[in-house]
Image (tube, helix red, strand yellow):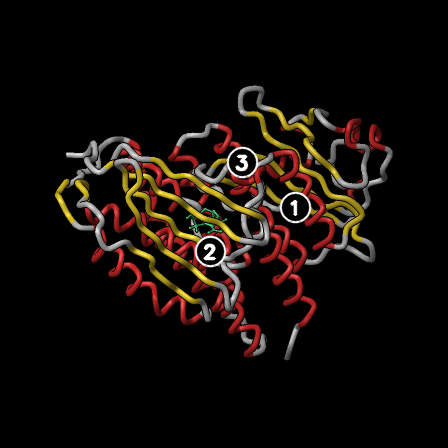
Amino acid sequence: MTDQPLLDNYQRLLEISRDLASTLDLRVLLHHIVHAAADLCNAEAASILLYDQNRQDLRFEVATNMDDPLMRGISVPVDSSLAGWIVTNRQPVLISDVEKDLRHYNQVGDSVNIKIKTLLGVPLIHKDKVIGVLEAINKQSGGFSPQDQDLLSALGAQAAIAIENSRLFQQTDLISDLVHELRTPLASLTTAVHLVNRPEISEEQRKRFIDILQQEISRLSDLTTSFLDLARLESGRTQFHAEIFSIKPLLEDCLEIMRARAEEKNLTLAGMIDDDLPELNGDKDKIKQVVLNLLSNAIKYNYPQGSVDLSAKENDGEMVLSVRDTGPGISQENLKHLFEKFYRVPGTEKLAVGTGLGLSICKQIVEAHGGNIEIQSQVEKGTTFIVHLPLISLVH
Ligand code: ADP
């Protein structure tokens, strides 16, 4: 037996969870959550109350359909309200006639001009701590069902993570950035695993969920490696091993490594490496890492049939390496953010999987050598990353 509406709802939930992970603005996030809640449960309205531990009370933060400014900040006593009951008992509540329920706190309904008949509420729990309550009010037809309760609980679990993430992100240190970035794929993984195991889904749907699983797993693994790399570089704990070496074979190596990936996308990959380049003094492996990263980006963020050119020349006592592509280019506005950790140019997520850490790592490595990275880009024409390296570097 297939249960298409239920499946549609879970698919919707997967989309919502990805959507929630994409915003860090708490207010925007809360709006997303209540609209998703009303939508999923077919309710007249939905709201979120957050629990304030210091004051030991609950406050309305956001609601659909109800007068937002009027409601925001309304405090609800924990000991004599339904929301308070949910917080204290850490359990969902499904009520078919609110008026008859003694736990109801009348004053809220009065002050927001909405007659509350049926109500479904779930606790928002994060790491064993109740952070608030998500409520759906007045099912459009009939009463809320146990299935609505399951859906709202699942949404509540994701919402709690997203809310805590967004709070954490306010403190912008590397660890909270990472926590946020790890939770994004983890939330999608959890939902995708749930969906993939459902017996009634079609083969096509199953493949789609497995694709999402694979993408997110590989992103997680890249993220961990890159994050450690960056954390070491930023804290000055990276060991550099300087040596004198010739750059030409290194660059040819990089081209060889990348050739298959370029061919997969029907890209032309070419090198224009001067023959009489001077030797370089620096960390060979780290320089190679930079070149590979730039080539990899030029391939990833390129259009099929496009081209990638790697060139190397000496100019004014420095080595100049450049990687040019014929991809979508980067606008002036977005260029400003390019070296920010975890930053990805909006729209490029569709072209390739990424972590937004590679360029920060490249910048750290190049700067440790006393060099710098310059970017020239034209929207819809392509981008060139130019690495300037002193012949005798600062690393030792
Ligand atoms: P990742 O590719 O893993 O996301 P990077 O730090 O290497 O991380 O790049 C950050 C972002 O910069 C990418 O997500 C992409 O949006 C943008 N970007 C990098 N290289 C290019 C390029 N050659 N063309 C267009 N956009 C690029």
Q: At 43% across and 55% down in the image, what residue appears?
A: 298
Q: Is residue 102 left or right of residue 111?
A: left
The secondary element bearing badge 1 is classed as: strand
The verdict on label 2 being within 8 Å of ligand 1 is yes
* Spatial CA span between label 1 and label 3: 26 Å
Q: Identity of the amino acid at label 1? A: Val
**Label 2 Cα crowd, 10 Å radius (few <14 / some 14-19 / many 20+):** many
Cβ–Cβ under 8 Å for marks 1 and 3: no
x, y percentage for residue 269? 39, 64
Q: Is residue 28 left or right of residue 220?
A: right
- Residue 129, compared with residue 117, is above or below; it is above
In this view, the residue in front, 138 or 270, is: 270
- Asked which quadrant contains residue 374, the reply is top left
Where does the C terminus fall, quadrant-wise? Answer: top left
Q: At 40% across and 40% down in the image, what residue appears?
A: 178
In this view, the residue in front, 279 or 119, is: 279
Q: At 41% across and 30% down in the image, what residue appears?
A: 173
- Which residue corresponds to mark 1? 93
Mark 1 / mark 2, whichever is N-terminal: 1
The secondary element bearing badge 3 is classed as: helix
x, y percentage for residue 386? 39, 44
Where does the N terminus fall, quadrant-wise? Answer: bottom right
Q: Identity of the amino acid at label 3? A: Ser
- The image's mark for residue 166 is 3
- Which residue corresponds to mark 2? 325
Q: Identity of the amino acid at label 2? A: Asp
* Spatial CA span between label 3 and label 2: 35 Å
